[in-house]
Amino acid sequence: MSKLFEYSGSEDFCPGSSMYTNPKDSSLFLSLPHHVDLYFPPRKRSRITAPFLFGSKANVSIDILPDECLFEIFRRLPGGKERSVCASVSKKWLMLLSTISCHELKSEDEAASKEAEDIEIESDGYLSRRLEGKNATDLRLAATAVGTASRGGLGKLMIRGNNQISKVTDLGLKAISRGCQSLRALSLWNLSSIGDEGLCEIAKVSFQLEKLDLCKCPAVSDKAVIEIARNCRKLTDITIDSCARIGNESMRAIGQYCPKLKSIVIKDCSLVGDQGIASLLSLNTCALNKVKLQALNISDVSLAVIGHYGKAVTDLALTDLKNLSEKGFWVMGNGHGLQKLKSFTISSCNGVTDMGLESVGKGTPNLKHFYLRKCSFLSDNGLVAFTKAARSLECLQLEECHRITQFGFFGVLLNCSTNLKALSLISCLGIKDISSELPIQVSSGSLRSLTLRSCHGFGNRNLALLGKLCPRLQNVDFSGLVGIDSCGFLAWLQNCQSGLVKINVSGCVNLTDKVVSSIIKRHGWTLEMLNLNGCRKITDAILTSIANNCPLLSDLDVSKCSITDSGIAALSRSTQLNLQIFSVSSCSFVSDKSLADLIKLGETLMGLNIQHCNAISSSTVDLLVGQLWRSSTPWRSVA
C-alpha cells in the first residue's frame, strides 16, 4: 500500500467516484443487466484525491477506492500468483481482474510470462478446462481467465451447460477473450444465454483458434460465425449443431475466409440450404476433406455441387436429408469430382435408389468404406450393381435396409471385387432362408469379417452356402440368428479353412455344447474372443474344453448360460489360459463357492462381470473386489 500512496508517474488515475453506489457491495458485478459490459478502463487517466482515513482506531478498507484505482493496482501486481490471490478475495475483485486484458498487464514478470507462452505454443502443449452443468458459470470462467493468464491462457475450453438453468453469458466469454488469447479449441453446448457478443470478442483476439464446436446455442447467429471466420484463419474443424439462427451467410464466410478448413459438420440448422452448401464447397476446394450434413433443408442441388466441387473430400456423410431424390445421387456420381472419396455414409435418405447408387459406385473409384442405413427404396439389383462398380470397396455395411433379401446378400458375395474384406448386415428383415440351390461359380476368398446381426430369417441353408462362398472368414458375428441350429453351424464349420479369431453367437438360443466343442476343437488355438451370451444350452463342459484348448482366448462371455461353480473351477485350474475379460452375468448357478477361483482368474483379468448372479452374496462381492484391486493387474472394471 505504501507504494500506492507514494505513486507518481506519467499515467494518472481517472477522476470521479466509483460506478457503484455502495463500493463495498461485492456482488454488484453479478447484477449487471445482460447488455451492460464489465468496466473497461480508458487509456488516459488523471489523478484524483481519495478520502483516506488515518488513525489507530480507523477501520480502513481498500474497497473505498474507486474501481479505476483498483484496476490500476491489479494490473501492476508482480505476477499471476498474486492476481489469483486477489481474485479469491471477493466476487467484485474477481470480476474486475477478469476485465484486464493480457496486453494491459504491467508486471515485473510480463516478459518472462510472454516467453513461457511462446515456448508452450511451440511445443503444442496447452492448458485445458471443462465446465459442466452447475459448474458452468461466469464466475468460473472469470476465475479460469485470471488464473491461467500468466501461463499463456487456455488452449482448449469446453462448456456443457443446461438450457434450463444456464449461468454462462457473454460476460464469461468476454473474460476468456481477455485472459486466454491463445485459445485453440472452443466447444459450447446447451447454452441458450450465449449470444453473438461474447463470441465476437473471442474472434477479435483468438487468432490461434483451430476448432469450433457450437451445439444448441439458439442465440448465436451468423454475425458471430462470420466474425470468427474472418479473424480465425487457422480454423481446421467446425461443428455447428442445432443452432437455429446460423444459416447460409455463415457457410459462405467459412468457405471464403477459412482456407485451412479440413472438417465441417452441419446438423439440424434450418436456415442452411442449397445456397450455403454451394458457397461452402465452391469456395473451399483445396483443403476440405470431411463433410457431414444432417437434417438440413437441402435438395439435389447440393448433391450436384458436392459431386462437382468435392475434389478433396475423402469422408462424406449424408444423414436424414428428406428432400433428396434419385436424380441428385445420379448427378453426384456423374460429377466426377469425388475421385478421392474413401468413406461414404448414407442414413435415412429415401432418395437412394438402384440407379442412383450404381452411379455413386461408378463415380467414386477409390471408395473403400460404404455404410447404408434406413434406405428403404434400395433393392437387390442396385446393391449388386454398386458392388460391381465400386472395385476398391473394402468394407460394406447395411442396416435396416429391408428390401435387401438373401439374393442381394449372396449376389454381393459372388460379384464383389477381391478387395472386399468386411461385410455387415444388421436388422435387414427382408432376408429369408434360401429355398433353392444357387449356382456357385467362384468363392469370395477375400472376405475376412462377416456380421449377420438380428437378421432373423437367416437359416441353416443360408449358413451352409455361406461356408462354401467364404471359406477364409476369421471374424464372425451371428448374434440374434434364432433360426439357426446345430445342423447349420456344423455345415458351416466344415468349410472354414482359416483359423477363427473372433466369434459372437450371442442370442443363438439353439446352439449346443456339440457345436461349440467343434469350434474349439478346430479353432481353439487361434480363438481370441468368444461370446456365448444367452446360449442357455451351453454348460460347464465348454469351459473345461476352453481351459484345455484356448491359450490365446482373452475375452469370454458366458452370461445367461447354464454355467456352475464347477465350470469356473475348471477355468481357474488351467495353466495356459490368459483371460482378460470374463462375464458370467445372470448365471444363477454360480455361487459364493467360486470366490477363490475367481480370485485366481483375477491374476490376469482386467474386467469381470458378475451382475445378477443371485447366488453370490454381497459380502463375497466385497471380498472379491478388495482382492482384485490389490492385485498388480491394472483393473478397468468390476461389475
Image (cartoon, rainbow, N blue to C red):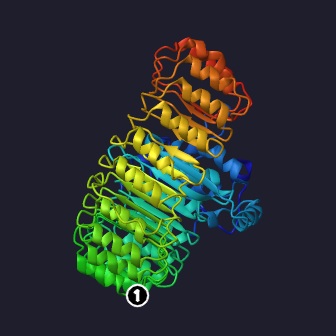
x and y percentages locating residue 524 in the rendered image? 62, 41
x and y percentages locating residue 12 in the rendered image? 62, 65
Location of residue 638 with respect to 45 vertically, above or below: above
Location of residue 507 with respect to 178 vertically, above or below: above
Local secondary structure at mark 1: loop
Please name whichever residue, 399 or 23, is drawn nearer the observer in this view of the structure.
399
Q: Which residue is painted at 61% across and 31% down in the image?
A: 545
| Disc 1: CA contacts within 10 A as few (<14), some (14-19) or many (>=20) | some
Please name whichever residue, 548 or 201, is drawn nearer the observer in this view of the structure.
548
Q: Is residue 39 visible?
A: no
Q: Which residue is mark 1?
A: 336
Q: Tag count in the figure?
A: 1
x and y percentages locating residue 133 in the rendered image? 43, 42
Q: Quadrant of residue 574?
A: top right
Please name whichever residue, 137 or 449, is drawn nearer the observer in this view of the structure.
449
Seen in the image, is 325 located left or right of residue 612? left
x and y percentages locating residue 602 in the rendered image? 67, 27
Q: Which residue is painted at 66% across and 16% down in the image?
A: 596
Q: Is residue 225 visible?
A: yes
Name which residue type carries label 1.
His
